[in-house]
């Protein structure tokens, strides 16, 4: 703003009346004149996994406003701040608009022809020299399902590399692994409406008020429920709770086993259900017999009385719902923690009926779609690499030799990065993900990015921290610029519609994939006759037919008309039959182990990381939205008053967080009782204050999900007062 304009406003000559003028919109009544729409487009939000229905207003070919769809069953007209401002990302200044190729050390604009020719040529050269599996691909839960499906076929059957994974491994892999271990298959068993009907809702490591705010609306409709929140922090969700259990970090397994111990002791178990529908109970009961209230109290920091109270509340409920998110998943014990949660549901029969479910609340808008249709940790349609019949079924549908389909999954995301460091992976292709901010232990990631011979970053935004390492940047369309489906946490398939055209030369990921397939010479073999994502959807319907995630009876038109459709119905396992060889769910004995990097005299704090409601993941999108960025422009560190007094620190001091790996410098200190003594918390969204400089590079041995939540740090004042 010029000095003259500022002066005119201060003196009252410029009242900005055009900016603040109101007009009457036919659909919503009086509204800012800048937000009056000519047409409204139905779609689904592209941020988190709740899957809110939206109406986006368009005028003169531009999206000018957004509001919740009052007819959509998920959100019934409500939206969080990110959803209400989502249309702004379509005209954000940081959009990627043209392909860029590194020449003489600099990224310079090139044509699509040169970009894709170079990509196929360079990756081909790497594979001829080092083998097909020298290519690693990391996709995302931000693509529509039709694109996830297309990418999987392209990577596994076109490029013929097994090393294909997604950024969903950083958030949901442990939930997937835990469901498979307990039930024989992925797939959240319940629905959001179970939160509205349960007697008891137990949330473990789940701050839905910040991470999935519309679910709080669903929960608040259940006025008779008892809400129990298990979380080391006094989160916004904990503030809503009837009972808050501020457990010590990573003690949730002990608590869950302790609850199971009390349920067995008090006879608050469903013996008929256990006998008819589960296996492993006797061994499990013997195992948890040692998790007495006294033992669990020592581990968790809770009182014996509080542990007893919570166990009895859960055990006496007519219908009990357990929900969890990253507080459980982000751990080296994430997968087995999920099985421990499932144990509680199985031993009390709280699964497959109204109000009763062990329910993983997913992260990204289409993480579920990647799990169903992707070709990463499993074959499309919840099939298994190691199952010969599954491979033969797909080979027949695709009309390819069965030997083309791998018999085992390739490297998971963390192992792809490690492979790049060790020289096993020589080329990387990242699609709609920003690992420089989102991947743990940044120094290892940086080494990986600098070690490969060719790095492709395909994204809707430029520049991004990851794109700065790229040899090739492909500009992609984003939400609002393409068509397809998302699947939300409750297995509801929702329609996603194109609102506007992508900017500049940006292209839909689907079109990029088909163009690459043509250059590889596999387009007619793998994608014969395809031109739109509807073609991919129709093939996916055939691939999923007869599977648990069966789309065969769905059409885009049905999905849109009905406000989404849940595959499998409202609840899975209503008949008590599970996807295991004997049809029984498994009860697992899960030992409690302390987290890996314990605090000591040099690094005396446990660092916890998480989200804030205003931002999304690495802020690639939300930092471009002025309303959101102005609310939370910078990272901060939370510290308990007792610790601040001990260190002679005051609110708003600038501090540095130091771990054994690196440091995060010069962030604002917030002194608050939200965190317990000995613990600190910071949000992970900010590239400028990247929490993953200090986080631990440790991963779940089963799911390969990172342990983002606990590492030892110390805190120092950055500058003298």
Image (cartoon, rainbow, N blue to C red):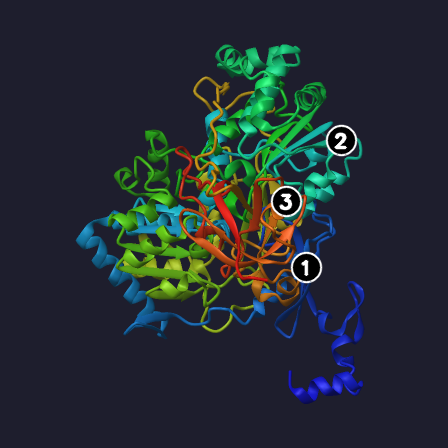
Q: Residue at x 37, y 40 (%)?
A: 397
> What label sits on residue 640 in the rendered view?
3
Closer to the camera: disc 2 or disc 3? 3
Q: Are marks 1 and 3 in contact (CB under 8 Å)?
A: no
In front here: 417 or 387?
A: 417
Instruction: Residue 426 in the image: state x and y as whole percent.
Output: 26, 54
> What label sits on residue 84 in the rendered view?
1
Instruction: Residue 320 in the image: state x and y as whole percent.
Output: 68, 26
Give the mark nearer the N terminus: 2 vs 3: 2
In front here: 464 or 580?
A: 464
Instruction: Find residue 35 and report its image quarter.
Output: bottom right
How many C-alpha atoms fall within 10 Å of the one at disc 3: few (<14), some, or many (≥20)? some
* Residue 650, placed above or below residue 270: below
Q: Are marks 2 and 1 in contact (CB under 8 Å)?
A: no
Q: Is disc 3 placed on a helix, strand or loop?
A: loop
Instruction: Residue 411 in the image: state x and y as whole percent.
Output: 33, 42
Give the mark nearer the N terminus: 1 vs 3: 1
Instruction: Find residue 453 and report its image quarter.
Output: bottom left
Q: Which residue is mark 2?
A: 225
Closer to the camera: disc 1 or disc 3? 3
User: How far is disc 1 from disc 3 in space, using C-alphas?
Assistant: 34 Å
Instruction: Residue 347 in the image: state x and y as whole percent.
Output: 59, 17
Q: Is disc 2 placed on a helix, strand or loop?
A: loop
């Amino acid at each position: 703003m010029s000095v003259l304009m500022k002066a005119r406003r201060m003196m009252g000559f410029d009242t900005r009346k055009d900016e603040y003028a109101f007009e009457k919109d036919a659909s919503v009544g009086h509204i800012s004149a800048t937000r009056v729409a000519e047409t409204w487009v139905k779609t689904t939000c592209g941020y988190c996994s709740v899957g809110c229905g939206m109406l986006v207003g368009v005028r003169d070919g531009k999206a000018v406003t957004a509001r919740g769809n009052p007819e959509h069953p998920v959100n019934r007209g409500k939206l969080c701040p990110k959803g209400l401002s989502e249309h702004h990302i379509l005209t954000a200044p940081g959009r990627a608009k043209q392909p860029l190729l590194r020449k003489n050390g600099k990224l310079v604009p090139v044509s699509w022809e040169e970009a894709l020719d170079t990509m196929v040529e360079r990756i081909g050269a790497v594979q001829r020299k080092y083998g097909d599996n020298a290519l690693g691909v990391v996709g995302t839960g931000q693509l529509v399902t039709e694109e996830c499906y297309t990418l999987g076929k392209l990577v596994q059957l076109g490029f013929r590399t097994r090393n294909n994974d997604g950024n969903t491994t950083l958030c949901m892999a442990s939930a997937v692994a835990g469901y498979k271990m307990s039930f024989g298959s992925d797939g959240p068993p319940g629905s959001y409406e179970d939160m509205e009907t349960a007697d008891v809702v137990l949330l473990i490591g789940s701050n839905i008020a910040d991470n999935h705010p519309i679910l709080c609306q669903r929960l608040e409709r259940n006025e008779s429920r008892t809400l129990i929140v298990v979380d080391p922090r006094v989160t916004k969700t904990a503030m809503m709770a009837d009972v808050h259990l501020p457990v010590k970090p990573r003690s949730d397994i002990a608590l869950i086993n302790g609850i199971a111990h009390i349920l067995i002791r008090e006879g608050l178990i469903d013996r008929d259900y256990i006998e008819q529908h589960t296996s492993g109970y006797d061994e499990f009961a013997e195992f948890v017999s040692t998790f007495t209230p006294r033992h669990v109290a020592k581990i968790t920091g809770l009182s014996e009385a509080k542990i007893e109270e919570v166990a009895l509340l859960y055990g006496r409920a007519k219908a009990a719902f357990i929900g969890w998110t990253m507080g459980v998943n982000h751990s080296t014990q994430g997968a087995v923690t999920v099985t421990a949660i499932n144990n509680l549901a199985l031993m009390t029969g709280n699964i497959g009926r109204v109000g009763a479910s062990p329910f993983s609340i997913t992260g990204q808008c289409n993480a579920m779609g990647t799990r169903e249709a992707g070709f990463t940790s499993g074959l499309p349609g919840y099939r298994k690499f190691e199952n010969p019949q599954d491979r033969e079924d797909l080979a027949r549908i695709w009309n390819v030799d069965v030997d083309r389909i791998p018999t085992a999954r390739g490297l998971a995301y963390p192992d792809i990065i490690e492979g790049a460091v060790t020289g096993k992976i020589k080329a990387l292709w990242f699609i709609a993900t920003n690992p420089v901010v989102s991947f743990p232990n940044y120094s290892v990631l940086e080494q990986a990015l600098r070690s490969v011979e060719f790095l492709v970053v395909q994204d809707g935004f430029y520049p991004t921290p990851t794109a700065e390492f790229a040899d090739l940047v492909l500009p992609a369309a984003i939400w609002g610029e393409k068509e397809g489906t998302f699947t939300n946490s409750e297995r509801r398939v929702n329609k996603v519609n194109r609102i506007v055209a992508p900017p500049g030369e940006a292209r839909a990921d689907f079109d990029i994939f088909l163009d690459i397939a043509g250059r590889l010479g596999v387009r007619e073999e793998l994608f014969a006759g395809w031109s739109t994502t509807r073609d991919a959807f129709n093939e996916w319907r055939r691939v999923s037919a007869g599977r648990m995630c069966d789309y065969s009876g769905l059409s885009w038109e049905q999905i849109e008309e009905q406000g989404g459709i849940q595959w499998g119905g409202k609840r899975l396992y209503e008949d008590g039959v599970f996807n295991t060889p004997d049809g029984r769910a498994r009860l697992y004995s899960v030992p409690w182990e302390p987290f890996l990097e314990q605090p000591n005299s040099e690094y005396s704090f446990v660092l916890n990381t998480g989200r804030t409601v205003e931002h999304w993941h690495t802020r690639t999108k939300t930092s471009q939205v002025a309303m959101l960025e102005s609310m939370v422009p910078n990272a901060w560190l939370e510290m308990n008053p007792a610790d601040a007094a001990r260190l002679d620190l005051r609110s708003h001091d600038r501090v540095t967080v130091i771990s054994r790996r690196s440091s995060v410098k010069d962030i604002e200190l917030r002194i608050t009782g939200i965190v317990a003594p000995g613990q600190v918390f910071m949000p992970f969204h900010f590239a400028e204050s990247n929490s993953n400089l200090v986080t631990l590079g440790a991963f779940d041995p089963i799911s390969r999900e990172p342990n983002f939540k606990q590492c030892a740090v110390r805190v120092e004042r950055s500058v003298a007062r």
